[in-house]
Image (cartoon, rainbow, N blue to C red):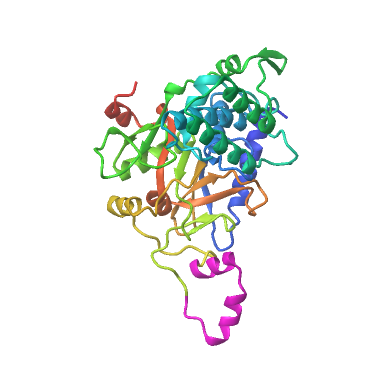
Amino acid sequence: MKAMTLAALLTATAAATAQSTDGYQFTTVVNQKVTPVKNQAATGTCWCFATTSFFEAELLRMGKGEYDLSEMFIVRQKYMNQLDDNYLRRGKGNLGPGSISPTWVTAFRQVGIVPEEVYSGINYDSPTHNHKELGSYVGAIAETAVQLRQRSPEYYELVNSLFDIYLGKVPEKFTYRGKEYTPKTFAVSLGLNMDDYVMLTSFTHKPYYAPMEVEVPDNWEHAEMYNLPLDELMQETDNALQTGYTVCWDGDVSEKGFSFKNGVAINPEVEKTEDLKDTDFARWNQMDAQARLAEAYRFEGPCPEVKVTPEIRQQGYEAFVTTDDHLMHLTGIAKDQNGTKYYITKNSWGTARNDFGGYLNMSESYVRAKTIFVMMHKDALTKGMRQRLGLR
């Protein structure tokens, strides 16, 4: 089976399963070709999985075929960059596993990329990724260097040995599909131009139509993104999905209305909890957290949702209830039986944690309220927006 055909089949299968959420009748408006769902497992590397998925979709869109790119090759370089940043900040840097899409772009520019089959990033006894020990040792090495106020040759050997042990040695050369590459020549062969990609956000405390730095801890590289009015942010996202592009999404998934198990993320006006009769208390106490959530939010069908204004969105951001918890990949648009818009969303939590192939549908209200930023190809913007932002 050809790569493009396989990708189309996988996308169609995921979209079909996403329609079957109990109580929700979803109709796909548009859905773009993407690669299969992966599993970040016991790591905080959603930023890398989402961004890698986005660029794999870009290769499909560009007619390059289907690629499975190595997330951990990028993650390794990200840790190297964090260690440098933390040392020069006298130990005040961010050494956590999280980050955002610009980190992927930085690492790609620095070291290139390799296929997953060349660098799986699992060099330990585990079928899936697990960075619990790795993260602890990164922190210990970083703290020691700061305390000693020096980074000796042995420090650099120690750092590289740590990543070699857990993630595997970086290949100087490799053969892929009959051709020999280095990580940098392979990156060049893909034809991805990092200058073609833009990030958009929407907050009222900074001027519109100008770059701004979103003040979240994972933006430790101080990346800037264009600040747009909320309605225009949504319009540009829709335009991308409707014209053959996909969108990398960073936002908050800590809300009660986010239910990966139920395959939906909603932003209800009020909790729909009904008064329980005395005879129901025993049943309520026996429910697990997910069952109580479903009971409270009535995930069995659509409900009225918050009409999110820029002021409501800003309030959530400044109250620290809208944070950059998670990155995912928007692949299309769907509507429920009431005509409410949802964004078809590819997650990186594997395919076994819900019945929808690892996908979910996020409502328009949820996305308006809980987006931190989106990334897309600059050609996905409307002509008017490109002109307004001065993008050629």
Q: Main secondary structure of the magenta part?
A: helix
Q: Residue at x 49, y 33 (%)?
A: 147
**Which one is nearer the viewer's eye here, 56 or 140?**
140
| Residue 11 image position (x, y, % from top left) | 61, 40
User: Residue 386, can we see it?
Assistant: yes
* First to last magenta residue range: 274-297
337 within the magenta span? no
Q: Residue at x 50, y 37 (%)?
A: 95
User: Residue 39, can we see it?
Assistant: no
Q: Residue at x 60, y 81 (%)?
A: 282
Please identify the quadrant where the C terminus is shown: top left
| Residue 149 image position (x, y, % from top left) | 47, 28
| Residue 260 image position (x, y, % from top left) | 56, 54
**For residue 250, side relative to residue 76 (left or right):** left
The relative height of residue 75 versus residue 369 in the rendered view (above or below) is above
The part of the image, by quadrant, that contains residue 271 is bottom left
Q: Residue at x 59, y 57 (%)?
A: 261
The part of the image, by quadrant, that contains residue 235 is top left
The relative height of residue 31 versus residue 258 in the rendered view (above or below) is above
> Which residue is outermost to the bottom?
278
**Which one is nearer the viewer's eye here, 252 or 91?**
91
The relative height of residue 87 versus residue 250 in the rendered view (above or below) is above
Please identify the quadrant where the N terminus is shown: top right
The part of the image, by quadrant, that contains residue 240 is top left
